[in-house]
């Protein structure tokens, strides 16, 4: 028993004398920021997310106000999330393109809706299914659709960032 304790003590002293361990070379993970935005043309609609919606999308949609309905921040190459009644899954990898790192991803978002009043059955409807490549820190538009009834649209934005 004394030998084991002495060996552990010797190993700890040897490791501490070597100094701190250097972080791994290269990227080790990905952070995803997924935003659900409601665009509206209604007078007085909240406009707290106008700065995160790309100008090119604003010119296409031509709405006056953009409000963030929800946001999730995730870390990992393969991850799942819930945002209200939406359930999402992201599978991603980092690719080296001649020294530039890009993120290749597959994303699926489904809506869960109860089909009976007892909550026993669920209907899963695919809202967005997308495969794409994004630059580190680039915001990509994954979907934008008009909401039934006119002056509103739902937008899904994602910003992947390579982390160490």
Image: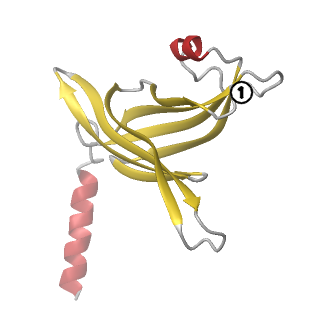
Could you say which is closer to the camera, residue 150 or residue 75? Answer: 150
Could you say which is closer to the camera, residue 78 or residue 9? Answer: 78
Q: Quadrant of the N terminus?
A: bottom left
Label 1 sits on residue: 48
Q: Quadrant of the C terminus?
A: top left
* Res 113 → quadrant: bottom right
> Does residue 64 sit above or below 131 in this rendering?
above
- Residue 74 location (% of width, % of height): 46, 46
- Residue 149 location (% of width, % of height): 69, 32
Could you say which is closer to the camera, residue 38 or residue 32? Answer: 38
Q: On the rendered structure, is 43 left or right of 121? A: right
Residue at screen point 49% across, 37% down: 33
Residue at screen point 57% across, 22% down: 53
Q: How many marks?
A: 1
* Res 59 → quadrant: top right
Residue at screen point 71% across, 17% down: 64
Q: On the rendered structure, is 88 left or right of 25? A: right
What colour scheme has been applied to the protein in the rendered image? secondary structure
Q: Residues within 10 Å of mark 1 (few under 14, many from 20)?
A: few
Residue at screen point 23% across, 86% down: 2
């Amino acid at each position: 028993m004394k030998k084991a304790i002495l060996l552990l003590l010797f190993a700890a002293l040897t490791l501490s004398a070597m100094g701190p361990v250097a972080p791994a070379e290269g990227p080790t993970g990905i952070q995803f920021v997924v935003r659900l935005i409601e665009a509206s043309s209604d007078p007085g609609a909240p406009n707290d997310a106008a700065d995160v919606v790309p100008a090119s999308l604003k010119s296409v949609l031509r709405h006056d106000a953009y409000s963030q309905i929800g946001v999730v921040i995730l870390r990992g190459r393969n991850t799942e999330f819930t945002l209200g009644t939406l359930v999402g899954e992201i599978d991603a990898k980092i690719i080296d393109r001649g020294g530039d790192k890009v993120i290749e991803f597959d994303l699926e978002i489904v809506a869960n809706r109860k089909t009976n009043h007892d909550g026993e059955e669920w209907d899963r409807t695919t809202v967005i299914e997308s495969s794409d490549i994004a630059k580190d820190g680039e915001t990509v538009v994954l979907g934008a659709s008009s909401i039934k009834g006119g002056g509103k649209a739902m937008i899904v934005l994602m910003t992947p960032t390579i982390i160490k």
